[in-house]
């Protein structure tokens, strides 16, 4: 059976930066996010006897054994195969609809789409909670992309306790917006996975980071339920700065910020001083994601577009979790 799924990327409002258990892929702290409409990965999966090996094609390029991309997909397919007792090899074809290297969590939408389509193609009927646990094994942030609207990934102690669930659906807050500012399309030097593992080992502030982040995640859940926009923005921004402080104090240092990142940060701080409702957050790369509301999008977009280092501004609304579609990629 061939199954095709569309899944959206998400942006962390309070971050995940560090695994407590490398094998179980459980994080040190709970973390929260919003799934973003329109930044999607489409993936088709088919298990069939006609395949003599696993095949993975992303954005029209085939990735062969020995590449990181192939390994990531194969590991996830192996988990699904073991769980469903499937013996056949799989063909996986994937496409991202957002600009390549735009700095949005493509591993989140990618692994969410792969997990969802893979399970359906293997006729494995799992609950959303079980799917988030499986997606977590592929990429931590992917667990949150399985959820519609606002999500929390509970750190948990055991594998079963480390899952994502919904804080509120997208209908809770249709006016919430994320503006993705593209600063650089260059590949980042340190991937999140390797970077966070090094932070756990060497950052002198790692304990401060994860203890604060755990309490931030719990506060964020309440603020989202209350729709307290300005407190959400302040908390997301402070949490992002602490995560990057943790990355920067890693040995060797992980410096995701570029001069352009700082240009946007300073502009946002200036606008905050003027009383504007605008905040920033940044993941493992130079791009800045602006947290704002629909009423301010036109004004903020114009200001951001006028900055020298901003190449593009992508407007994102709250989005849905994965869904099956009929148009297959092969
Ligand atoms: C900075 O989920 O990509 O975006 O679990 O190793 O695949 P792995 O890492 P990944 O890390 C995301 C880190 C982050 C913060 C976040 O999304 O919470």
Image (spheres, grey):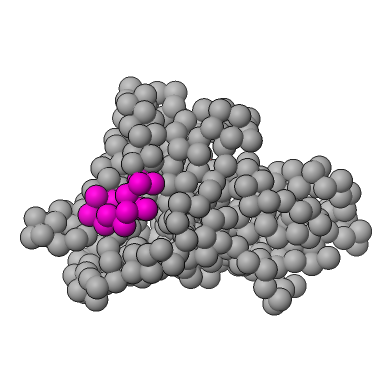
- The region drawn magenta spans 220-232
What is the chief secondary structure element of the magenta stretch? helix
Q: Tell whether position 312 is magenta.
A: no
Decide: is 39 above or below 203.
below
Name the outermost residue toward the left: 274
Q: State the quadrant of the C terminus.
A: bottom right
Q: Position of residue 203 (x, y in %)?
A: 36, 26
- At a point 15% along the width and 53% down the height, the residue shown is 269
Is residue 264 visible from the viewing direction of this image? no
Q: Tell whether position 221 is magenta.
A: yes
Dividing the picture into quadrants, the one containing residue 205 is top left
Q: Position of residue 150 (x, y in %)?
A: 44, 55
Dividing the picture into quadrants, the one containing residue 264 is bottom left
Decide: is 191 above or below 197.
below
Q: State the quadrant of the N terminus.
A: bottom right
Residue closest to the eye, 49 or 208? 208
Decide: is 126 above or below 159.
below
Side of 69 relative to 264 (left or right)? right
- At a point 75% along the width and 59% down the height, the residue shown is 120
Side of 268 relative to 192 (left or right)? left
Name the outermost residue toward the front: 226
- At a point 27% along the width and 54% down the height, the residue shown is 228
Side of 164 relative to 81 (left or right)? left
- At a point 81% along the width and 57% down the height, the residue shown is 123
Q: Position of residue 110 (x, y in %)?
A: 59, 57
Residue closest to the eye, 212 or 224? 224
Q: Position of residue 109 (x, y in %)?
A: 55, 58
């Amino acid at each position: 059976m061939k199954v095709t799924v569309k899944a959206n990327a998400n942006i962390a409002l309070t971050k995940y930066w560090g695994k407590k258990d490398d094998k179980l892929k459980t994080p040190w702290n709970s973390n929260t996010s919003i799934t973003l409409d329109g930044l999607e990965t489409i993936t088709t999966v088919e298990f069939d006897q006609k395949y003599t090996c696993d095949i993975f094609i992303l954005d029209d390029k085939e990735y062969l054994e020995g590449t990181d991309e192939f390994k990531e997909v194969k590991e996830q397919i192996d988990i699904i195969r073991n769980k469903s007792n499937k013996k056949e090899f799989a063909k996986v074809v994937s496409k991202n609809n957002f600009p390549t290297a735009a700095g949005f969590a493509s591993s989140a939408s990618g692994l969410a789409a792969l997990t969802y389509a893979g399970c359906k193609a293997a006729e494995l009927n799992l609950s959303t909670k079980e799917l988030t646990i499986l997606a977590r094994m592929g990429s931590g942030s992917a667990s949150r992309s399985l959820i519609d609207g606002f999500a929390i990934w509970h750190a948990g102690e055991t594998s079963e306790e480390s899952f994502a669930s919904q804080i509120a659906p997208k209908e809770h807050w249709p006016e919430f917006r994320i503006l993705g500012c593209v600063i650089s399309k260059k590949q980042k030097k340190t991937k999140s996975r390797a970077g966070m593992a090094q932070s756990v080992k060497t950052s002198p502030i790692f304990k401060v980071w994860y203890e604060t982040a755990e309490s931030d995640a719990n506060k964020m859940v309440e603020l989202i339920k209350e729709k307290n926009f300005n407190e959400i923005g302040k908390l997301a921004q402070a949490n992002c700065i602490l995560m990057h402080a943790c990355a920067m104090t890693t040995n060797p240092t992980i410096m995701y910020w570029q001069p352009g990142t700082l240009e946007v940060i300073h502009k946002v701080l200036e606008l905050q001083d003027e009383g504007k409702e605008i905040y920033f957050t940044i993941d493992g790369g130079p791009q800045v994601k602006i947290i704002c509301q629909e009423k301010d999008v036109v004004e903020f977009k114009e200001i951001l577009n006028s900055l020298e280092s901003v190449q593009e501004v992508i407007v994102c609304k709250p989005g849905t979790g994965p869904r099956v579609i009929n148009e297959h990629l092969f």
